Image: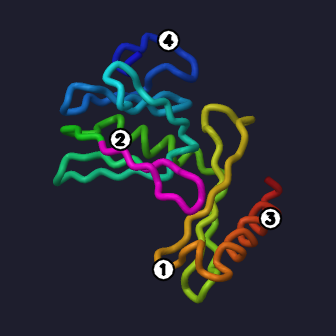
Amino acid sequence: MSAASRQLAGGKEAILAAVQLTNGRWAAGTRAAVYLPSDSVDADRRVGWEHIERANWDSEASVLHIYETTAFGTPLRATELKVEDPGRFGQLLRERVDASIVVQRYVPIAGKRGVRIVARRNPASTDAPVTWNFVLDKGLEPTQPGVLDAAEAALQQVRDEFGI
């Protein structure tokens, strides 16, 4: 079912904002998730807000870039939405991604370079499970000696500090 044709009233899956892409498809956001075009013309891909790492708008190219979290050591999954103007959908995207962050902490692990520890939960439910991920600064690779151990120790330190 396409985002444009969703007819759910109220609740966590009611559409709060949508944007039509230049190719005629739609992207939409609800309290619990964002619906992005999939490879199939007649289906969307549902992504919980807690799985969106970040998004940015390139006004010169009229492209909204959305980056999803992935397993550590793998590139973020990027989706490009070609739109005239993200409007309210862009605002909702920023608001819901920010609302999904429970804890965010930067921990230096090698000189000035370090790791950003992030705990997220779906903002539509206060009892949703918390997912943790960490992002290494440029120049740090998980294959470098000691980097992965230091990042995992930083993650444990932050988890212990917040009791999550």
Hey, what amino acid is under mark 1?
A: Gly
- Secondary element under disc 2, as helix, strand or loop, is helix
Establish if 141 lies above or below 39.
below
Query: Is tag 3's residue or tag 1's residue first in the polypeptide sequence?
Result: 1
Q: Is residue 30 left or right of residue 164?
A: left
Between the residue at mark 3 and the residue at mark 4, the CA separation in whole angstroms equals 40 Å
Q: Quadrant of the N terminus?
A: top left
Q: Nearer the viewer, mark 3 or mark 1?
A: 1
Instruction: Check residue 70 for magenta coloring.
Output: yes
Residue 95 coordinates in the image, percent (x, y): 47, 43
Q: Are marks 2 and 3 in contact (CB under 8 Å)?
A: no
Q: Are marks 2 and 4 in contact (CB under 8 Å)?
A: no
User: Start and end of the magenta stretch?
Assistant: 67-80
Residue at the (34%, 35%) spot, across then down: 88
Give the residue number, with chain letter if any, for mark 1: 139
Query: Is tag 2's residue or tag 1's residue first in the polypeptide sequence?
Result: 2
Hey, what amino acid is under mark 2?
A: Gly
Q: Which mark is residue 9?
A: 4
Hey, what amino acid is under mark 3?
A: Glu
Residue at the (39%, 28%) spot, across then down: 28
Residue 149 coordinates in the image, percent (x, y): 72, 74
Give the crowd class for mark 2: few <14, some 14-19, many >=20 residues within 10 Å.
some
Give the residue number, with chain letter if any, for mark 3: 161
Give the crowd class for mark 1: few <14, some 14-19, many >=20 residues within 10 Å.
few
Query: Is tag 2's residue or tag 4's residue first in the polypeptide sequence?
Result: 4
Residue at the (59%, 59%) spot, across then down: 72
Establish if 25 lies above or below 69.
above
Q: Are marks 3 and 1 in contact (CB under 8 Å)?
A: no
Give the residue number, with chain letter if any, for mark 2: 90
Give the crowd class for mark 3: few <14, some 14-19, many >=20 residues within 10 Å.
few
Between the residue at mark 2 and the residue at mark 3, the CA separation in whole angstroms equals 33 Å
